[in-house]
Image (cartoon, helix red, strand yellow):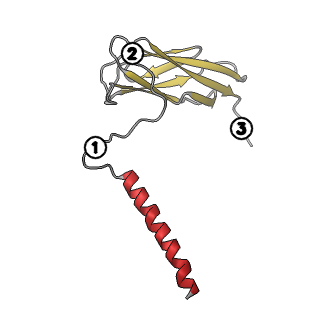
Amino acid sequence: MTSGKLWLPCVVGMLVCLGCLTWGVLPSASQERLPQAAGRRYGPTNPGGYYVRVEPRAVTMSHNQHPQITVTVENAAGQPVDDVLATFTPSEGTVTTGSSSTRGGTVVGTFTAAPGSDSPRTAFLVVTVENVEVTVFIDMVPAVFGR
C-alpha cells in the first residue's frame, strides 16, 4: 500500500513535465512561430532597416585552421533577406566567401590567418552590413603536434 502512494506523485509529476514539454515545443495553431537564429541581433541598418546576426562572435584557433563566420540578414519580422552586401575586413590574413551578397539570408566567410608567425595573438574581423559593424575576435594559439 505504501509503494502505491509513492508511485502516484511520481507519475503525476512525469505527466506534468511531459505536458509542459509538449506545450513548449508545439506552436499553437493561431501562431506562426519561426525558428530564431542564434546570437544577438544588431540593427536596424540604414537605409534598408535590416537586422544582422554574426556567429560565432569569438574564435580560438591555431594558425592552420580556417574558421567560418556566418552572417545572417533579416527583416524586422525575422525573415531572411537576399542580395544584401556583407563585407569582411580582417585585421590580418584573408577572408574568402562564395558571394559577398546574402543568399537565403546568409553569407559565410572563411578566415585564413596571415602566414608566418605561430606566436599567440588576437586578430579581429569586422563584418559590415550597410551601416552596422560587428567585430569578431580571433585568438590564435600555437599549434601543438605530437602530444
Q: Residue 115 location, x and y as percent?
A: 62, 19
Residue 32, position as x, y percentages in the image? 28, 41
Quadrant including the C terminus? top right
- The residue singled out by tag 1 in the image is 31
Amino acid type, residue under disc 2 in the picture: Thr
The numbered mark at residue 68 is none
Q: Inspect the image, locate mark 1, and give the three-letter code of the amino acid beneath it.
A: Gln
Query: Residue at the right extreme?
Result: 147
**What residue is shown at x 40% (from left), y 61% (from top)?**
19
**Label 2, label 1: how far apart the Cα atoms are:** 27 Å
Q: Is residue 66 left or right of residue 36?
A: right
Gap between marks 1 and 3, in whole Å? 53 Å
The amino acid marked with disc number 3 is: Phe
Q: Nearer the viewer, residue 44 or 104?
A: 44
* Earlier sequence position, callout 1 versus callout 3: 1
To which quarter of the image does residue 77 belong? top left
**Residue position marked by numbered label 3 in the rendering:** 145
Crowd band around label 2 with a 10 angstrom C-alpha radius: few (<14), some (14–19), many (20+): some
- Within 10 Å of disc 1 (Cα), the crowding (few <14, some 14-19, many 20+) is few
Looking at the image, residue 72 lies above or below residue 31? above
Q: Nearer the viewer, residue 105 or 10?
A: 10
Q: Which residue corresponds to mark 2?
A: 45
Q: Callout 1: helix, strand or loop?
A: loop
Residue closest to the far bottom: 1
Q: Which residue appears at 73% of the width and 41% of the height? A: 146
Measured from the top left, where is residue 90 in percent x and y?
Answer: 55, 15
For label 2, the SS is: loop
